[in-house]
Image: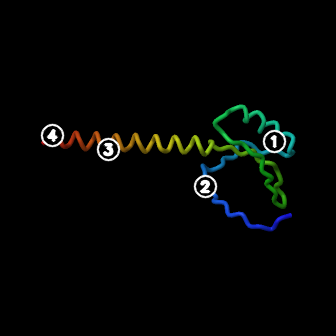
Amino acid sequence: MSTEEVNTIHQEGPPWKIVGRFPTFELANEKREELLLEDTIQVKVHWQGAVNNRFYAVKVRTDPEIALVEELAQKRAEKKRRKAKLNKKRRKK
């Protein structure tokens, strides 16, 4: 095995939201497979273990690439709105 270090840049994406908690992995995996039918979201099963409270959580978030496209579209729309408002003020004079 190689012990070379690989520098990768970690990019933050949208936050994960818990959509269900299950006592067994099989039940959580069924829910995950059901949610995977949607193309716009990412789904994962995460072990949540504490002393008295142990379960598998199913988490979802929007796909980071889609979220980036939506964010850019929102910024463009805001910029257009600000420009239109500014031009309207300039025409009044």
**In what element is the residue under mark 2?**
loop
Tell me which residue sits at (46%, 40%) in the image. 73
Quadrant location of the N terminus? bottom right
Expressed as whole percent of the image width and height from the top left, the position of residue 63 reads 63, 42
Closer to the camera in the image, 44 or 28: 44
Closer to the camera in the image, 40 or 9: 9
Q: Which residue is mark 4?
A: 92
Q: Which residue is mark 2?
A: 12
Mark positioned earlier in the residue sequence (1 or 4):
1
Quadrant location of the C terminus? top left
The answer for how far apart the CA atoms under marks 1 and 3 are is: 46 Å
**In what element is the residue under mark 4?**
helix
Q: Nearer the viewer, mark 1 or mark 2?
A: 2
The answer for how far apart the CA atoms under marks 3 and 4 are is: 16 Å
Tell me which residue sits at (72%, 31%) in the image. 37
Indicate the amino acid at tag 2: Glu
Q: Which residue is mark 3?
A: 82
Q: Which residue is mark 1?
A: 28
